[in-house]
Every structure is written in C-alpha cells, then in structure tokens.
C-alpha cells in the first residue's frame, strides 16, 4: 500500500517506469543531485553549475543517472525547454523519489508529445549500471553491459479519487481543469500518494521565463479556459514588468517574458511577482495546507511558519491552483516531516548575519536527501531574515522540503525518525565552506542584494551600512525586492536613502532570473550576501560570484575592491 511519503515502491530486481518509452544513449552518471535551473543551460543541455562535479558535461541525448534532483522547482521548466528544443537527456534514471524533472517530462509528453522516459531503480541496480558506457531502454527492460533489468509500470490502483476529483478528471469543469487533474493524478501515482488533499492557497513559480516552452504551456492552459480557484500569488518574473523597455531589455526577450506573466495574471493569479511570498500580508498559518512552488518559499513555509506543502515543481503549481487539490504526499504528511539526520553545528561566538546562509548551504550538503534537525543554533537567536537566508541556501544543495532548528522552528521538538543519524558541522567545515563560496577576484563591479527578495529590514540594514556614502562610479549596487517591500521603503524614506547612495532597487525580477542589460554587462565579478546566488550565480551570469558579509558588500560598493577573506568570527 503506498505511503505517500517515499514514492511508489520497487524491488531490487525490478525497475519502476515513471514515464515509459524507449531510449538509447551514453551514460552520464552523477553521484550527487543537480538543479537543472541554474545548473543546466536550457539552450544546449550542458551542465553550467560550477560547483557540480559534472560541470561542462553535455546531458543532451544521454541516459542521465542521478540519485534525485535538488534545488530549484524551476528545473521542470528547463527540462521541458530542453525537450521542446531537442536537447533533452534521452532518459532520466533515479534511485530516490524525484518530482521536479519527472514533472517536466510528464508535461512534455502529456501536452506536447515529447517523450523523455523516466525510471526509478533500486540503489543496488542503480550502482550496477552507473559504470556502464551505454544503456538501452525499452518499455519493459533496461539493458546495460549485458545486465538486463526488468521494468514494471506504476501501480494503477493506489490513488483513490473523491467523486469531485473524478468529475474534474472527466471534464466537468472544462478542459483546463481536466488536463490539470490528469497531470496531478499522474504525479500523485508516482509519488505513491493514496489520495489528493485540499489546499487553501497556491504560489506559482512557473512564471519565470526559461524559454518558449514555459510560455507555450501557460498560454495553452489559458486557451483551455484555465482559471485559478484558490488565492494564488506569483513568483518573481524575468523582467521588471513596467520598466523593461526603458531598461533596454531586448524585445525578443522582454515581450515573451512579460506575456508569460500576463498569461498567469489573466488566469486569476495575483501580480505579486515575489520569490518571498511569506513577506506578503497574511502569510500561511501553522498547519495550513498550501500548494506552493519555489524552493526557498517552500522550505521557509514548512520550516519557519509550520505550514504544510510539498516542494511542488513548476507546472504542477498551476495544476494545483486550477483545482485546489494537491497529492497527499511528502511534507503534507507527518512522517515526511520528521528529521532523518541530526546536524550538530559549531556556531562561532559573535557570528554575524553571514553565518546563516553559510550554515544553510553546508546543511544542505550534509543532508542532500532528507529533512535535518540542526542543533546548536538557538544561542545565535536567528531573525526571520536570518532564517530566510538559511532556508534559501539550504534549498540550493538539498532536495528536502524543510529543515528543523532546535529551539527555533515550531516542529523542532518532534521526535526524529528512529533511523536518524548524526553528523557534525565543525568550525573547520565552516571555514572551508566560506572559502569555497568567497573565492574570486578582489576587484568587484557589482553588489547583488535580494536573493530571495530583500525584506524591509534588509533594505534598512543596507541603507544604514552605507550611511549616506555614495557608491564608487564603476560599481553597480542593485537590490531586488517585491513590490510591497519597495512601497514600504518608499513610504518610510529608506528608498530615498538608498537612491542617494547610488543604489538601484528593482521590482518584479530576482537574481536567479535577471538578465543583461539590467545585470550590468561590464560585470566580471559579483559579491552578494546570498548563499543561494553565490551558488547559482556563476552558471547563470558567467561571472565570478562571491559570498560576502554586508560589510564586505559595502566596502566593495564604496571602493570597487574587497579581498577574499574570512569574516572576523571565523578568523
């Protein structure tokens, strides 16, 4: 009987067909997961994540093996883009539950007739074929170096639908809802969900323009009559919706990016355009079932607010918003929220705010496939902004939908799973982690603040640190923030203070979706307070991107230089 927490089950000698089809290609085997958003070039299929061991490898036409994906929910959009352009992997093979890339492949097949087979193998079988040069996949067998692994379809009877679910699936509410329910049910089956559940609200991540495929999907669902039935906010988009033409964004990019946002707005989504929806008024309450996408938002909602949402991939977010239903799986369930790894952190005395993205990043590496409980952090008294930074950085390196912090987050007191183990994050680990994210040129041309979107408090802190001093003429300082935060900075005078220092505050887009020329074209090196952007930035921008303290960022803004160095609290 499916549990809804770990995906459909399989035996060691039989692989599970999540999406069927035939394929043959060379093997690209990965020992660690990869975020396709920020990790794979959607135009070529080449790995662009400079922190990943497979950096530079082409996945186009390959049989790609990885334990599971990690990072951004937008990976499904990149997979769809690759499939539509003919540069997708020939097949995807996992050994752990995986939703993001599976959903991208599902949408490619269901709506556009592009097939990328997706399989799940036991760990033993996965390890056996990881060293093969070539794999062949048929609907019933995977063959590699003389080994033949039989493949079984997903169980057809594990998902129980209510009469209302069945009516939506049969088209009673129109073709868009029927298509959404078909995708939801397929995903629920591969997750091992026994049922669907109601959600009170949704958050759309698929409004980021990764390429034409995202726009084709959204406008196709709109043409089918799609209309959201629960309150639905939207993630940051890929342009400043009102100002992109004045900013010099080429129409070839600006027009489809704005069209994508407009399609979701016409379907009833709120034009919130923020990757930090928890900063909006009336955030979700503890225990509230929600249907959110965007990795940092999901992790913050589950971990800090105590709301309940799975880490929904792009495209599934719209399906949830159109139906008000989500698979009853993952972090909706008590069992999936329990800590399965205990991480004891050696928190430095007098650590500054920059310790939190560093700890989040390293905790994700220490718990890439499970919910952790972080211990030893309560004395640091993390603020909501500290937790925002930690959750976002954690989401770049872990596939888990949440974490716990002993003495801080609301569910941290619940008993861990019986099989939970313990690892240490030592001072030496923190030093090595900082060095890995802070390396780069001393000369800096861009200071990047707001990944995720800056809060009102973070804008005030930057204005206070600059203290009326103007940036150097050859350095750009850019803050990305949601419209509601920018309005707040304007009403209290913080926006005027920032602008007087030469800081540009940009709405609607964020650092993971910013493009040139809003991203200054002359930039070669960037410094940021964001662990998330320090990870994704090099692949997305082609520049060196360094993690720094707020003081480092201010020094770079004023002088154009800041040497790679440890913070005082790590020296």
Image (spheres, grey):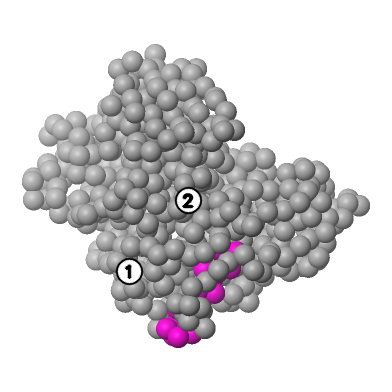
Marks 1 and 2: CB-CB under 8 Å? no
Q: Is residue 112 visible?
A: yes
To which residue does mark 2 refer?
Answer: 333
- Residue 261: image x %, image y %? 35, 69
Q: In this view, does 339 lie above or below 296?
A: above
Q: Is residue 224 above or below residue 447?
A: below
Q: Earlier in the sequence, mark 1 or mark 2?
A: 1
The residue sitting at the left extreme is 492
Magenta residue span: 171-189
Q: Is residue 43 visible?
A: no
Q: Is residue 175 part of the magenta span, yes or no?
A: yes
Instruction: Please name the residue shown 40% across and 22% down the image.
Output: 376
Q: In this view, does 423 lie to the left or right of 332?
A: right
Q: Quadrant location of residue 93?
A: bottom right
Instruction: Please name the residue shown 81% across and 65% down the image.
Output: 140
Quarter of the C terminus within the rendering? top left
- Which residue is at the front of the view, 405 or 538? 405
Q: Provide the secondary structure element on which disc 1 rests.
A: loop
To which residue does mark 1 refer?
Answer: 230
- Which residue is at the front of the view, 444 or 293? 293
Q: Nearer the viewer, mark 1 or mark 2?
A: 2
- Residue 274: image x %, image y %? 30, 56
- Which residue is at the front of the view, 368 or 78? 368
- Which residue is at the front of the view, 518 or 410? 410
- Residue 566: image x %, image y %? 40, 20
Q: Provide the secondary structure element on which disc 2 rests.
A: loop
Q: Quadrant location of residue 254?
A: bottom left
Q: Is residue 453 part of the magenta span, yes or no?
A: no
Q: Quadrant location of residue 411?
A: top left
């Amino acid at each position: 009987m499916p549990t809804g927490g770990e995906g459909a089950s399989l035996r060691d000698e039989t692989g599970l067909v999540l999406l069927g089809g035939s394929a043959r290609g060379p093997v690209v085997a990965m020992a660690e997961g990869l975020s396709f958003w920020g990790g794979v070039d959607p135009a070529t299929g080449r790995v662009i994540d400079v922190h990943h061991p497979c950096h530079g490898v082409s996945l186009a036409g390959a049989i790609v093996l990885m334990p599971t994906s990690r990072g951004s929910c937008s990976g499904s959009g990149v997979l769809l883009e690759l499939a539509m352009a003919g540069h997708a992997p020939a097949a995807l093979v996992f050994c752990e539950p995986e939703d993001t890339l599976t959903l991208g492949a599902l949408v490619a097949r269901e709506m556009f007739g592009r097939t990328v087979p997706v399989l799940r193998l036991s760990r033993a079988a996965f390890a056996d074929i990881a060293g093969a040069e070539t794999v062949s996949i048929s609907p019933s067998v995977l063959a590699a170096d003389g080994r033949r692994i039989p493949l079984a379809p997903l169980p057809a009877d594990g998902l129980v639908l209510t009469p209302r679910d069945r009516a939506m699936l049969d088209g009673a509410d129109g073709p868009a809802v029927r298509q959404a329910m078909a995708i939801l049910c397929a995903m629920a089956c591969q997750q091992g969900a026994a049922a669907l559940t109601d959600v009170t609200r949704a958050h759309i991540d698929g409004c980021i323009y990764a390429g034409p495929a995202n726009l084709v999907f959204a406008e196709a669902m709109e043409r089918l009559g799609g209309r959201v039935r629960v309150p639905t906010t939207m993630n940051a988009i890929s342009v400043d919706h009102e100002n992109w033409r004045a900013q010099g964004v080429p129409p070839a990019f600006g027009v489809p990016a704005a069209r994508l946002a407009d399609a979701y707005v016409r379907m009833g989504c709120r034009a919130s355009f923020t990757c930090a929806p928890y900063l909006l008024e009336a955030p979700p309450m503890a225990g509230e079932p929600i249907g959110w996408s965007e990795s940092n938002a999901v992790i913050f909602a589950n971990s800090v607010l105590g709301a309940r949402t799975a880490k929904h991939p792009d495209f599934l977010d719209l399906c949830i918003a159109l139906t008000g239903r989500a698979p009853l799986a993952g972090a909706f369930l008590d069992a999936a929220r329990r800590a399965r790894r205990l991480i004891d952190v050696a928190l430095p005395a007098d650590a500054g705010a920059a310790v939190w993205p560093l700890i989040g990043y390293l905790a994700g590496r220490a718990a890439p496939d499970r919910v952790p409980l972080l211990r030893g952090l309560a004395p640091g008294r993390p603020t909501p902004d500290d937790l925002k930074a930690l959750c976002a950085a954690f989401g770049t390196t872990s596939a888990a939908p949440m974490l716990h912090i002993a003495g801080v987050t609301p569910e941290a007191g619940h008993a861990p799973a019986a099989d939970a183990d313990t690892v240490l994050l030592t001072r030496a680990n923190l030093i090595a982690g900082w060095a890995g994210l802070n390396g780069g040129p001393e000369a800096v041309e861009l200071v990047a603040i707001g990944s995720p979107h800056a809060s009102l408090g973070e804008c005030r802190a930057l204005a206070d640190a600059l203290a009326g001093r103007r940036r150097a003429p050859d350095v750009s300082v850019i803050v990305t923030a949601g419209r509601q935060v920018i309005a707040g900075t304007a009403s209290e005078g913080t926006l005027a203070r920032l602008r007087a220092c030469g800081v540009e505050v940009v709405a609607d887009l964020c650092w993971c979706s910013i493009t040139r020329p809003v991203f200054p074209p002359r930039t070669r090196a960037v410094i940021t307070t964001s662990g998330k952007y320090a990870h994704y930035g090099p692949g997305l921008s082609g520049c060196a991107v360094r993690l720094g303290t707020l003081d480092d960022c201010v020094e770079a803004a004023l002088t154009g230089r800041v040497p790679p160095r440890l913070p005082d609290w790590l020296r």
